[in-house]
Amino acid sequence: MSAAPLLECRNVKKHYGALAAVDGIDLAIADGETIGIGGPNGAGKTTFFDLISGLTAVTGGQVLFLGREITGIPPYRLFHMGMARTFQVTSGFGSLTVLENMLAAVVYGTGSGRPGLHIACAHRDQSMACLEKYGLADIAHQIVSGIPVLSRKKLMVASAVVHNPKVLLLDEPVGGLMPGEIDEFIDLMFGLRSSGICIVFIEHVMRFLTTVADRALIIHQGKLIYDGNPQKIAEDALVRSVYLGSAAHAVAEKVA
């Protein structure tokens, strides 16, 4: 008998009046899977993430995590349950140093409920160890607003995984990066995969998606239109039609 899904969506919907931003998605994600989500702009990908992570209330359906319904649970509680999430905008606390950002994640991410920012030696040691792991130790005392985009993205991931979540949701993790930087981030992702964490990410850069993911999802107009092998996305007629348009799709069919 197969294990229960780590994360499950059952007919999840989000309607804004007559607009169905997410239109009845069913999905089961196993522990340790790495899933890449693609689709045109406005397809409903980020809204779908918002529903999973508790940032936006669902109109209908259920989201389950570790076999428990989490529909309506706020994001900070989901984080303490083992679900971490990053966003498209890679900001951090721009006026603080890299180390101070990491310390904030370490201290507040425990869910202990203690007021204030009490920093112990163990917190500092944990923060520096994580920065070292992600190649950020040499810029630990630099202000975040002045560091390169790639470093900010690495810090974002490091802050999200410092408490060893069971699932990590990444929204367009390589957006704005140069090809060489994307290659470096791919290596980072393979390192995360080897740790056993379940990763679900949204990405428009198909080279990244097909290299990193072991399962691909394509969303269009709020619906899941593809769920399968990342290497075979381009072979799917409906996906080609969505990305290329009907005229281009017809030309492609003739060439084939």
Image (cartoon, rainbow, N blue to C red):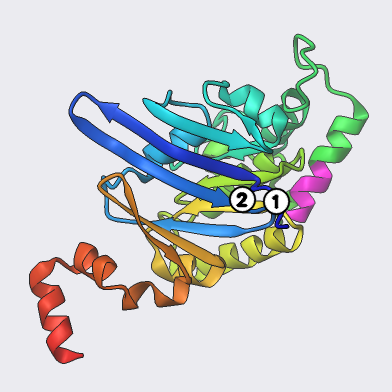
- Which residue is denoted by mark 2 in the rendering? 154
Q: Which residues are magenta?
A: 128-134
Residue furthest to the top: 115
Identity, as a three-letter code, of the amino acid under mark 1: Leu
Residue furthest to the front: 1
Q: Residue at x 58, y 51 (%)?
A: 29
Mark 1: give few (<14), some (14-19) or many (20+) Cα within 10 Å: many
Q: Return the residue nearer the eye: 192 or 7.
A: 7
Q: Return the residue nearer the eye: 161 or 231.
A: 231
Q: Is residue 33 left or right of residue 221?
A: right
Q: Residue at x 76, y 9 (%)?
A: 115
Compared with residue 120, is residue 92 higher up or lower down, i.e. above or below? below
Residue furthest to the bottom: 255
Residue furthest to the right: 121
Determine if the magenta segment contains residue 131: yes
Compared with residue 42, is residue 109 higher up or lower down, i.e. above or below? above
Snapshot quadrant of residue 17 = top left
Determine if the magenta segment contains residue 141: no
**Which dot marks residue 226?**
none
Snapshot quadrant of residue 89 = top left
- Which residue is denoted by mark 1 in the rendering? 136
Q: Is residue 111 left or right of residue 152?
A: right
Q: Residue at x 34, y 31 (%)?
A: 14
Q: Residue at x 65, y 45 (%)?
A: 6
